[in-house]
Image: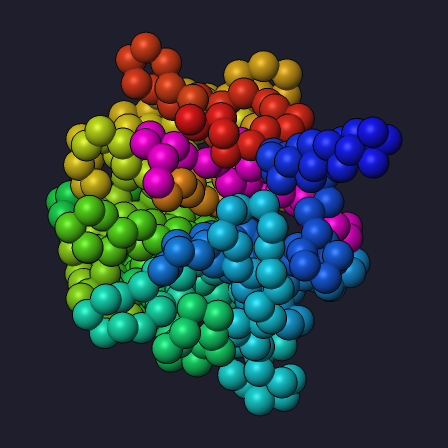
Amino acid sequence: MKLILYLLWSSLLVCSCQKERKTIKPGNIWTDNNGIHINAHGGGILFYEGKYYWYGEHKIEGKAGNKAMVGVHCYSSKNLVDWKDEGVALEVIKEGTGHDIEKGCILERPKVIYNPKTQKFVMWFHLELKEQGYRAARSGIAVSDKATGPFAFVKSLRPNAGQWPRNVKDIHKQPVGDDVQEHYCGGKGCLPSHPDTLNLLGRDFDKGQMARDQNLFVDDDGKAYHIYSSEENSTLHISQLADDFLSESGNYARFFAGRYMEAPAIFKKDEKYFLIASDCTGWAPNEARLAWAPSIFGPWEELGNPCRGEEAELTFRSQSTFVLPVQGKKNAFIFLGDRWTSENAIDGRYIWLPFQFDENGIPYLEWMDEWSLDYFD
């Protein structure tokens, strides 16, 4: 009888373990299959052939980790909880070469999309050339035949050189004043007047527009878009990519002039486009911003802060980096944010929360200490 009871208890224990729900704990240390804290900051996720691939900045300890000393790390998962270390997908180039992605450059917010026409995985990232601070404001592009890499660097560029946006104003085509500087500090409050008055768009027309914090978005029709902070971070640009996803198409528009939008991420629900972004306050967290539009090219309307509850004014001490649609679940979207630790970059934490929707279909976020994908069922 004791043996029978023991076997029954054992079977129940096994069943209980098998049914144990795997959870996401925002702000905790998240370990990979090797028990090491996941090193993929400012990242984005690609779903391909049944797996999620997470790409992000590989950080090292200390302030030095705020520059690219290793490259872009990749992890894979089937359930968004258990992550396998797939290694460095894009390596920086050794020092002394003068390469665009030489060790010590600034390489931020890598995002990867798959091009079914070329069968290539395409990575875009914000690139600042070594020892130039944030003056270069370029976009880097790399490609791979495999989701896990290795990715080969293709080029860096300033987007849309020689192209006017769809919503260009007459003022932008006027001569640029002699008092307009080639570089400003790149932060909120640095410009002496409104960006349209300065005509930063016209200033950068020939060499291409500035591109800092950035993201990628692939629409239902397969067209891909590059979203980036431009014009000394004062204005957001949304730009359609060429068919091979390796360059801009020249079809772009500018939005939120003078609003200093950083960390942009776009998702689509019920034929509506939603944008979440942050203010421009460096490493310090701030109040998130939400906007919506009936088309990728607008008109965009701001809806205020999507966060609710304690520390909502700080986006729960994080900054947006991506919005992930969960495969196989209807209207399931996850906010991906980073809790930056600039004094010790490697210790940055990840804030993932499920988007909720109010009675009008407007998305919002509430803090959860722990949650699982069952939330969307």
Left of 30 or right of it: where is 372? left
What is the quadrant of the N terminus in the image?
A: top right
Residue 6, quarter of the rendered image: top right
Q: Is residue 306 above or below residue 143?
A: above
**Which residue occupies 35% across, 53% down?**
216
Q: Is residue 272 above or below residue 57?
A: above
Residue 197, quarter of the rendered image: top left
Query: Foreground: 118 or 322?
Result: 118
Left of 201 or right of it: where is 155? right
Coordinates of residue 112 in the picture (x, y in percent): 40, 61
Res 225 seen here: yes
Q: Which residues are magenta?
A: 328-353
Coordinates of residue 95 in the picture (x, y in percent): 64, 84
Q: Is residue 338 magenta?
A: yes
What is the quadrant of the C terminus in the image?
A: top left
Left of 249 or right of it: where is 257? right
**Which residue occupies 27% across, 32% down?**
269
Coordinates of residue 24 in the picture (x, y in percent): 61, 36
Q: Is residue 150 above or below residue 238?
A: below
